[in-house]
Structure formats: structure tokens, C-alpha cells
Amino acid sequence: MRTGVLEIDDLKDSVARDGFARTSAAEMKALVGVAALADWPAYAATWNDLAQDAYMADGGRYRRRRFAAFEVAPGALVRLPHQPHFQSLDYNRLNGGVERWFEPVTGAVAEHALTRRILNLALEVFGGVSPDPGFPWRAEFHQFRIEARLGEDAQPTPEGVHRDGVDWVVVMLVARENVAAGVTSIFDPAGTSLGAFTLTQPLDAVLIDDNRVFHGVTAIEPVDPTKPAFRDVLVVTFRKTRSD
């Protein structure tokens, strides 16, 4: 039960009840802790060094990213050898069906205390609502930047409303500079809206049960077309490596 301060159990309850849970920046700061956020500006600045996504089937050049894969369990994080990201066409009608080799997440980001804390927080929440977590899980870690320019359709989720084909997803805002829109929507499998909201502050986040709900984000556009405009997010997906 909510008591004014968001607790881990509140997130578990929301995910179990609704299929997703939102956290504000202030709540996420409290959950992550001061130590992990000690050099947040330097961590967030790594999004300035992402590579162009060369696999956009819509021809768009508005997305930059880096990628890493991990084997994870509570308190344990092992980075896997660099490998391609793959989604079937069932889950990504636009860019699925091919191995996509993205530039790797840097060692400094992969080994950062905040990376470890976010992954462990997610495991605590998602593992707490799974009847048999069956750790370790596979985690895929994506740094995304969507750049908005006048006259270009800058889509945070160019595949539209979708599932990722995993078990769980965390989406956390890192930066939002000179952009409008970018509304996150959650739907049940029948297409009924379960909620719509905008991540506006760094560390605003949503935790998603990918087996139960669909999600999507509307296109962003620059507020002032003469200035840089972008939306930076961290997306981490989790998949059990064995069935319950």
C-alpha cells in the first residue's frame, strides 16, 4: 500500500495488478540511492557518444544507440561477448528479422554503479512478481537517442505500439532537450488503453510486463527548430533463460 514514499513492494503491486508501474524522478532517486547517482552528469553525458542506427528500414537517420547483453541474477552481473540484437518480425515489423550489430556500450557504462543498481532494482521488482524467477536471466541494455528535426518524423518506437518479445522491460528517461510530445501509452492485448503519460524528468521511468501489455511512444518534434532537440532513454529488457 502506498504510504507517501514509493517502496519496492509498491512497484511489485503495480506490475502484478496493471502490467506496468511508473516511477517519478524523485521516486527513482530514492530507490536507486545517492551513491549510485554520485556522478549522474557524467553518466548521462555518455548519451552524447552514441552511434548512428544503420538498420532503420524506414530510412530514418534520427536514432542513435549502443547495445550490450548481460547474464544477470540478484547481486550478479556478467557482461556477455558483444553480439547482435535480434527481434523476430512478429515483434518488430519494421526492423525485425535481421541480426543488428550496434556499437557496444562502453566498459565505463557497463561497469558503472548506476547500471548495476538499475538492473538489480529491476530484478527485485520483476523477480518478486514471477512465481519462479529461475535466475540467471538475459538482460539487453540499450542506450537510445532520438533526434528531432523540422520536417522529419522522429519516432522513439518506429515499429509502433508493440511488445518486445521478452518478459520484462524498463524504460528510463535520461534527458529531454527542446522537444514536444513523446507520449508513452500502454495497452492491453485487446487494444484498450491502460494509461498514457510523458516521461519529462531525468530518471522518470516505467517498468513493463512484456507478456501482458503493449507499449508505444508518439513521435517527438523540436520546440525550437534552430536548436538541438533530442530524447535520451535507457531501455533494459529481461528474458528468462528457462521456462517457469
Image (tube, rainbow, N blue to C red):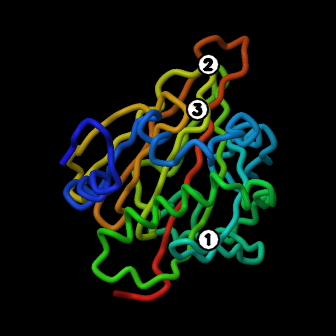
Q: Which residue is mark 2?
A: 178
Q: Amino acid at mark 1?
A: Phe
- Cα–Cα gap, marks 1 and 2: 32 Å
Q: Is residue 206 left or right of residue 131?
A: right
- Cα–Cα gap, marks 1 and 3: 24 Å
Q: Which residue is mark 3?
A: 153
Residue plotted at (38% across, 50% down): 215
Residue plotted at (69% across, 45% down): 59
Residue 147: give x, y in percent of width and height.
67, 32
Q: Assess disc 3: are there few (<14), some (14-19) or many (≥20) residues with their C-alpha within 10 Å of its C-alpha.
A: some
Residue 189: give x, y in percent of width and height.
25, 59
In the rendered image, which quarter is residue 104 located in? bottom right
In the rendered image, which quarter is residue 84 located in? bottom right
Q: Which is nearer the N-term, disc 1 or disc 3? A: 1
Q: Which residue is mark 1?
A: 86
Compare residues 67 and 130 and report the one nearer the observer.
130
228 lies above or below 125: above
Q: Which is nearer the N-term, disc 1 or disc 2? A: 1
Q: Is residue 237 left or right of residue 191?
A: right
Q: Which one is in front in this view, the residue at disc 1 or the one at disc 2?
A: 2
Q: Is residue 27 left or right of residue 120?
A: left
Q: Are marks 1 and 3 in contact (CB under 8 Å)?
A: no
158 lies above or below 212: above
Q: Amino acid at mark 2?
A: Asn
Q: Are marks 1 and 2 in contact (CB under 8 Å)?
A: no
